Image: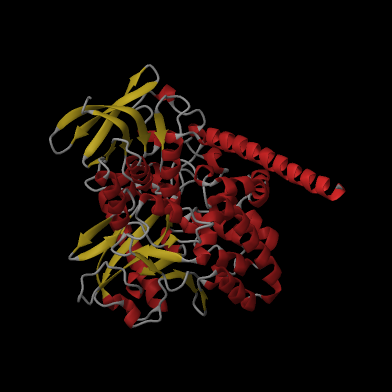
Amino acid sequence: MNSNKYDVIIIGSGLGGLTAGAALAKKGKKVLVLEQHFTIGGCATTYKRQGITYEVGLHEMDWGTPDHDMKHFIFKKLGILNKLPLVKLPQVWRIKTESEQVTIVEGRENVIEELSRMFPEEKRGLKRYMRAMKHSSKLAGRMPADMNLFRFFCFPITHLPFVIADIVRRKERVGQRMDKYIQSSKLKNILNINSAYYTNNPYDLSWSYYSCAQYNYYHSAVFVKGGSQVLSDTLGEVITSNGGELRTLCDVNSITLEGNKATGVTYYDKRKKEHVTLQAKRIIANTDPANLFGSMVPKELQEPHIDKLKPATSLYTVYITFKEAPSKHYHLAYSNFIVEEKDLNQNPKVLWASMNNRAVQERPFVFVDYSTIDSGLVPEGDCRSFGVLTSITQLDEWDSLDPETYSNKKEELAQALFGKLEKHYPGISELIERYEVSTPKTIQRYIRTRNGTAYGFENKDYMMLGRTPKKSKTIKNLYYSGAWTNPGGGFTGAIVSGYQTALEMKFPMRWTIILKTLLCCALGFIAVEIIIFILNLIIVAFLK
């Protein structure tokens, strides 16, 4: 056997690629993951500054019930559910204006109760809004391939009506659904305060995508102790412990094609300063499709609809080392959304339509204080702590700046945000030991995505309509995973996409559904025949 031939080569080690690789390696496939960066994980990584672990991407990860959150099942199937040190957050988040604060506690019923107390006239609409979210998220609990026959048999009753409703309403946006149930602009803004985790405008955000994650957030949210690198490394260990390989600083230049069939890759080894060509039965692209077409493969083989799709918004992040934990001095939540009172009361359609016209520092932002939990980011006995300030921004707000102007703008942003933070928590600036600012240019440099986005394409269209397919329609043996494919961006979206891609490679979903449907019909027919036979026996006995 050719030692250089793999069952699967995965280009990119984001969570989608790592999850797909782990699932396939567990099934005995010979897997190789190639990563151009010096560490695996994509946005799920950390780095060190003066002994403090800086978390790159994870603020909080939605953690719903197993029926509504497939991560439970995926992690259990990969054997890592009990290995991951998940720290439950003390509350969903807190919103702070100049004169008030609103704390969203965990638990959906608690959220409804608290917000109904604040907005008694909205109680009925709030319940309907949450119920609609529940129905949409119910579809995300399990894939057909993972349902036992009884669950699949009951699917037409328990799930199919919600599937049909979701398809009928596939063009519905979050803003439209909120407007349908909620009248108060303030309540709409409270419910949607974390929009930056999804988009730069909830009126352009797919309801079906949003509802799954948001409903799970209201149940609970978690942080991976030690940072998201722990999650990436744990998935990587599943790959290597099952015979797979992880290679960093390996920059894929091209995908080998025989006609329109992918047969391998060529990459540049940055350590050895040499090109390496390997064969593979199948390739998974866990990268921005723009990195593939016209570079790794001819542009004419691009998926037909990709040119119509736009990359999602990006973020800036100010990473901060505090001399002491701010939570010792101030009454802080884990996630503190800092919003001007006039914005919280503004009509959300008007508010979000104007957001990109504001200076970056004038947009609402979130202060994540990792000192409020046992984050594992600070060494034992060290009194310092870590926190971040983050919000939406676009690459074109930074990309054309010369180095000096770029550096100055980052400094101006940091100082403006510190000033805003100071108004809410007087004296907090004195606790800052060091800080650094990342922008869309930073994200673009490390994970090579258009617009410097971490979220893939805009989550605007229904499921696969706004994404790359799991299996390429133009190149045989090429598959996709990660934020650019269904279900979308974010930690959960990338993890689920990787698992779904692995399932598609093992046995296409459509055939799973067809075969299970036929089997259920056969079992149903047999069950009906047995019931008729028993009834006949009872009738015969009665007539005697």
Residue at 42% of width from left, 44% of height from top? 499
Q: Which residue lies furthest to the bottom in this view?
A: 329
Q: In which quarter of the image is residue 520?
A: top right
Return the x and y of residue 179 as percentages of the image width and height: 67, 59
Question: What colour scheme has been applied to the protein in the rendered image?
Answer: secondary structure
Depth check: 163 or 183 in front?
A: 163
Residue 2 as seen in the image, left or right of residue 443 = left
Q: Where is residue 111 drawn, in percent x and y?
A: 57, 71
Picture quadrant of residue 411? bottom left
Where is 251 relative to 329, above or below? above
Can you tell which quarter of the image residue 189 is in? Answer: bottom right
Q: Quadrant of the N terminus?
A: top left
Judging depth in this view, the residue of 474 and 532 nearest the camera is 532
Residue 18 shown left or right of residue 350 in the figure: left
Spot occupied by residue 318 in the image (x, y as percentages of width and height): 33, 62
Residue 195, percent from left and from top: 51, 58
Residue that lies at the very extreme toward the front in this rendered image? 544
- Is residue 483 among what the camera can see? no
Count of marks placed on residues:
0
Q: Which residue is drawn at 52% across and 45% down?
A: 143
From the viewer's side, name the closer residue of 428 and 485: 485
Q: Residue furthest top?
A: 259
Q: Which residue is drawn at 24% across and 57% down?
A: 47
| Residue 32 can be seen, yes or no | yes
**Residue ID at (30%, 28%):** 280
